[in-house]
Image: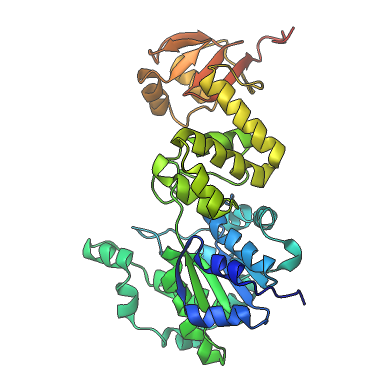
């Protein structure tokens, strides 16, 4: 068994940095000082293929537990992912197919181990136990809760007041997450503030199986690039698998009001150093933030390089050192069609909007007419301040760099 570290300073930081609430704080603090190795649980449903910085917040707290010698139990919710969690939804989450879940979770463990210490992590799929439960066991779990408790949840109450459907399937989800805590004998569960009800379900269910109620740590939620909660559903995410320069650019687009929070939740920078950085201008503070986060997932050299590249492209108005190329078959296209063909936008309407707003350049010339015909081969397209693409028409065998 790993050596358990009971350093008061480290335990205090564990229980406070980025933490919204601890249930029950005195009990958990006592357990952390006891020298006993705790079983610390996190479950993630693979509702999208990539882990983003918002989900990484709880993974980073798990890593902090590992550094104190405790055992992390990482559960990929292949069963609960099909059912769907209503915790942060204003409408009914559609059921995913098993094929969709299987596709999404292919790289979940490898992504998680960018943060967690694999040697100190016990991994599970919750279909291991949930797929074996029958109606009798489910009824036993359901008897522990009243419908009014589920209805009292803020987002559920809003939906019901607005006359929106709430399925019985959604009512069952907290039971399943709670049973996960029984199956792996969790001492502690960690999750975002939106998971509080589900985690409390574990505390209710565990005594029925002669287990002590788990303690709970709820973590603050991280805002995405548009200021709303970071969510794959909204597309406002910074993925931990993003290429270094792309990750850096997204971080630089985050609102100034969230800089301190990003430092606390998404980096390892000591809080004393964070306070020093916050004395800088928002731009310089974000440059440091981007460098720190990129370094965590791509290495220090990549962090420095992404910072230099950003300054070069945006401050010095230079082009990136490496510009990706795309091949298309047409010799000539309207500008809107060209953006779609080059996969710079998802739709022609989005292309038109960007062009008309002055956000598109071709060969360094701003374009505002979506219907303008463009000679595709060799065209350098710039969308916004940081996206560049060089177009090659497959009708031309000539290489651009000759």
Q: Nearer the viewer, residue 234 or 79?
A: 234
Left or right: residue 19 versus residue 104 is: left
Relative side of 117 to 349, left or right: right
Residue occupying the point 52% across, 48% down: 274
Task: Give the quadrant of the N terminus.
Answer: bottom right
Between residues 237 and 268, which one lies in front from this camera angle?
Answer: 268
Question: From this viewpoint, is residue 237 visible?
Answer: yes
Vertical relation: 226 (above or below) 313: below
Q: Quadrant of residue 151?
A: bottom left
Q: Quadrant of the C terminus?
A: top right
| Residue 371 x %, y % | 40, 13
Q: Nearer the viewer, residue 150 or 321?
A: 321
What residue sits 27% from the left and 67% below the top? 157
Q: Residue at x 48, y 23 (%)?
A: 385
Residue 89's image quarter?
Answer: bottom left
Tell me where residue 90 appears, x and y as whole percent. 34, 58
Depicted 277 relative to depicted 158: above or below: above
Residue 235 spot, x, y in % from top left: 46, 43
Q: In the shown orientation, is residue 148 left or right of residue 366? A: left
């Amino acid at each position: 068994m790993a050596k358990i570290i009971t350093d008061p300073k480290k335990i205090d930081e564990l229980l406070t940095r980025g933490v919204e609430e601890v249930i029950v704080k005195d009990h958990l603090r006592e357990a952390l000082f006891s020298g006993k190795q705790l079983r610390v649980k996190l479950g993630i449903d693979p509702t999208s293929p990539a882990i983003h910085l918002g989900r990484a917040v709880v993974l980073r707290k798990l890593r902090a537990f590992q550094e104190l010698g405790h055992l992390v139990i990482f559960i990929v919710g292949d069963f609960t992912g099909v059912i769907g969690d209503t915790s942060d939804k204003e409408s009914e989450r559609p059921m995913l197919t098993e094929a969709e879940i299987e596709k999404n979770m292919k790289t979940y463990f490898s992504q998680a181990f960018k943060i967690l210490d694999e040697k100190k992590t016990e991994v599970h799929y919750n279909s291991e136990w949930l797929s074996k439960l029958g109606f009798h066991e489910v009824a036993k779990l359901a008897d522990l809760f009243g419908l009014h408790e589920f209805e009292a949840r803020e987002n559920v109450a809003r939906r019901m007041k607005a006359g929106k459907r709430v399925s019985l399937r959604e009512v069952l989800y907290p039971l399943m997450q709670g049973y996960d805590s029984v199956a792996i004998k969790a001492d502690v569960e960690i999750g975002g503030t939106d998971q509080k009800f589900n985690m409390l379900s574990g505390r209710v269910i565990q005594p029925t199986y002669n287990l002590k109620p788990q303690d709970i740590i709820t973590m603050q939620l991280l805002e995405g690039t548009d200021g709303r909660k970071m969510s794959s559903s909204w597309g406002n995410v910074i993925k931990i698998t993003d290429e270094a320069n792309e990750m850096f650019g997204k971080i630089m687009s985050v609102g100034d009001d969230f800089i301190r929070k990003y430092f606390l939740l998404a980096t390892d920078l000591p809080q004393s150093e964070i306070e020093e950085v916050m004395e800088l201008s928002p731009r310089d503070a974000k440059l440091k933030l981007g460098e720190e986060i990129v370094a965590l997932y791509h290495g220090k050299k990549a962090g420095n390089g992404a910072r230099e590249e950003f300054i070069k492209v945006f401050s010095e108005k230079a082009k990136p050192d490496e510009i990706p190329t795309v091949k298309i078959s047409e010799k000539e296209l309207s500008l809107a069609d060209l953006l779609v063909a080059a996969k710079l936008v998802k739709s022609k309407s989005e292309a038109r909007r960007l062009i008309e707003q002055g956000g598109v350049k071709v060969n360094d010339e701003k374009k505002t007419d979506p219907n303008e015909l463009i000679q595709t081969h060799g065209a350098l397209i710039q969308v916004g301040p940081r996206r560049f693409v060089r177009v090659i028409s497959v009708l031309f065998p000539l290489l651009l760099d000759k």
